[in-house]
Image (cartoon, rainbow, N blue to C red):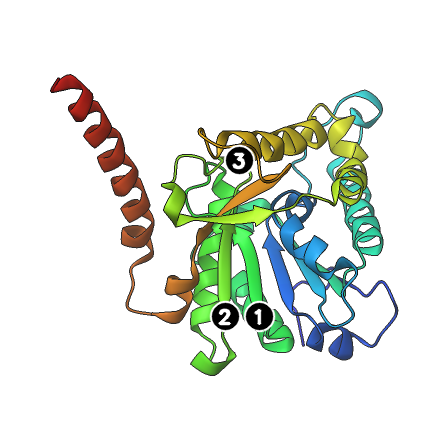
Amino acid sequence: MKLHNPTADVFIPDGLPPADALARVTHLGIGAHQDDLEFMAFHGIAACYESPGEWFGGVTCTNGSGSARRGKFARFTDEEMMAVRRDEQRRAAMLGRYAAMLQLDYPSAVARDPADPRLRADLLAILTATRPRVVYTHNPADKHATHIAIVVPVIQAIRALPHDQRPLAVHGCEVWRDLDWMPDAEKIIHDVSGHESLASALNNLFHSQIAGGKRYDLAVAGRRHANATFFESHGVDHSLAVSFAMDLTPLAHDDSLDILDYVTGFIDRFRADVVAKLRQRLAT
């Protein structure tokens, strides 16, 4: 497998040859930034953590040069911050027992350029080498421009695979916009209860962001607990920690589906639900 950026980092925590390490991946997370995987794809990380036959693989597409910074990191150059963030992501891969961790090292501006084919080609090469059963990536209704810039080429790369090599499931996960607004029946529910220590340890590895002014560690844990409690209004909590995902599997299996129409369909159904409930009340 050849990646476009010579500075891309292929890290195998247990030292297996890269081809063998990639071939064992069953759950693949593809995120924009260092720490996105731990925040949005923890369901896959936890599922593989103590499994003898399932392995989580990670892909981080951008180089981390635009990270917020203050405190001890306030005077770090972009190059210094990139090195710190790369090391943090490697340490997360070791702690989480990942099969492989690939950091593609694209500047965000390049990743956001739809005319540049390199990221899409790299993702296709990775998907071909791994052939995962499940893919976790950003959801297409996220508000972060770079997250949207990742999920689109992920879908395009999957569609470039032969049908019999495509993942069985593709989950678009919440990071910069949660998915509480989706109709409950359409949400993919990731129950991540029972792994709080691992989740906390992974989140706290990204010290450059926490000390740099973004308490992602608290925010991610809080969202998961809030999702669990506010999911059902008339029953007791069945989980302590839940994350939501949008089902992108139909986009991966049916090339005729328009991505924009598919995603706005969720929004239209949300609007229809709100309107119906209000009209019922206003009619009395």
C-alpha distance separating marks 2 and 1: 5 Å
> Residue shown at 51%/79% (left/top)?
165
C-alpha distance separating marks 2 and 3: 25 Å
> Residue shown at 71%/75% (left/top)?
24
Q: Is residue 119 above or below residue 81?
A: below
First of labels 1, 3 by sequence position: 1
Determine the secondary structure under disc 2: loop
Q: In the rendered picture of this protein, how many numbered marks are placed on residues?
A: 3
Question: Residue 2 occupies which quadrant of the picture?
Answer: bottom right
> Could you tell me if residue 137 is visible in this image?
yes
Q: Position of residue 61 (x, y in %)?
A: 62, 54
Q: Name the residue beneath numbered marker 3.
A: 176
> Residue shown at 81%/20% (left/top)?
71
Asked whether, in this view, residue 34 is left or right of residue 124, the answer is right
Type of residue at label 1? Arg
In the depicted view, which residue is nearer to us: 82 or 275?
275
Q: CB atoms at circles 2 and 1 under 8 Å apart?
A: yes
Q: Quadrant of the C terminus?
A: top left
Asked whether, in this view, residue 161 is left or right of residue 92, the answer is left
First of labels 2, 1 by sequence position: 1
Q: Nearer the viewer, mark 1 or mark 3?
A: 1
First of labels 2, 3 by sequence position: 2
Q: Which numbered dot is residue 133?
A: 1
Determine the secondary structure under disc 3: loop
Q: Name the residue beneath numbered marker 2.
A: 168
